[in-house]
Image: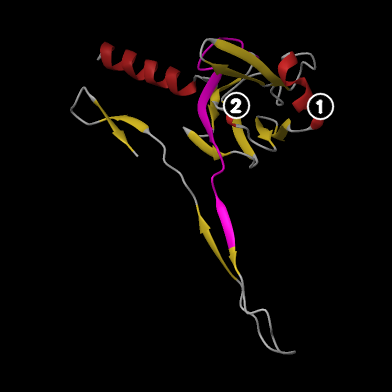
Amino acid sequence: MGKTRALLLLCAAVALCHCRSVTVSRGPLLRVEGQPLSIRCDVSEYEGPKEQDFEWTVTRGTETIKVISTFDDRFTDRSLQDRIQSGDISLSRLADNTVELRIQEARVSDSATYHCSTPSTDSVISGNYNADVQLQVVPNSLIVAPDAPNPVVREGGSIRLLCNVSHNFMEEFTCLLPGQSRRAHLC
């Protein structure tokens, strides 16, 4: 009976425990160059002030670059300051516990792992304080070619406009096949 009671108390304590949880958009994310993109970051189960702060960094290989912060105006790496100042990269607060990193025109060079982190406001450190997502920006290979209509249309007559759309998108993905230790390449 004593072990059962101890187990019930432990389960009750865990259920009452608040563990900070930071989440980002589910990935990996694949975007087209020149298009806008946004990556959402939420924090839940936290203590402290209602409005939480956020920092975004990116990692390419072994290099980590500071992108933008909700509380430190000097956080941004020098290499991104022009894009931040022009509004190409911005941070929008959607709620007290949610922000969205926005890029107006994605660049192939934006391909990286994006990290969202929140500083601790909790009395006890518990849970996760950051989350990351992989972003890949691919070149825009979309081609739109108009199909020219008849050059002469009678007044009041109808005209039908057509266009052909094609793209050249071939990307290699690596995945682990179930029950196998080798990788397969898919196009």
Between 76 and 25, the one nearer to me in the picture: 76
- Name which of mark 2 and mark 1 comes first in the sequence: 1
Between 169 and 54, the one nearer to me in the picture: 169
Q: Residue 94, position in %: x, y? A: 69, 37
Name the element at disc 1.
helix
Around disc 2, counting alpha carbons within 10 Å, would you say few (fewer than 14), some (14 to 19), or many (20 or more)?
few
CB under 8 Å between callouts 2 and 1? no
Q: Determine if residue 101 is in view.
A: yes
Q: Residue 73, position in %: x, y? A: 80, 17
Q: Which residues are magenta?
A: 120-145
Q: Residue 126, position in %: x, y? A: 51, 13
How far apart are the two marked residues, 2 and 1, measured between alpha carbons?
18 Å
The circle on residue 109 is 2
Q: Is residue 144 magenta?
A: yes
Q: Quadrant of residue 91?
A: top right
Taking the spot 72% from the left edge, 33% from the top edge, the residue there is 93
Q: Quadrant of residue 1?
A: top left
Front: mark 2 or 1: 2
Q: Which amino acid lies under the numbered mark 1 shown in the image of this protein?
A: Gln
Q: Is residue 111 magenta?
A: no
Name the element at disc 2.
helix
- Residue underneath mark 1: 85
Q: Residue 138, position in %: x, y? A: 53, 36
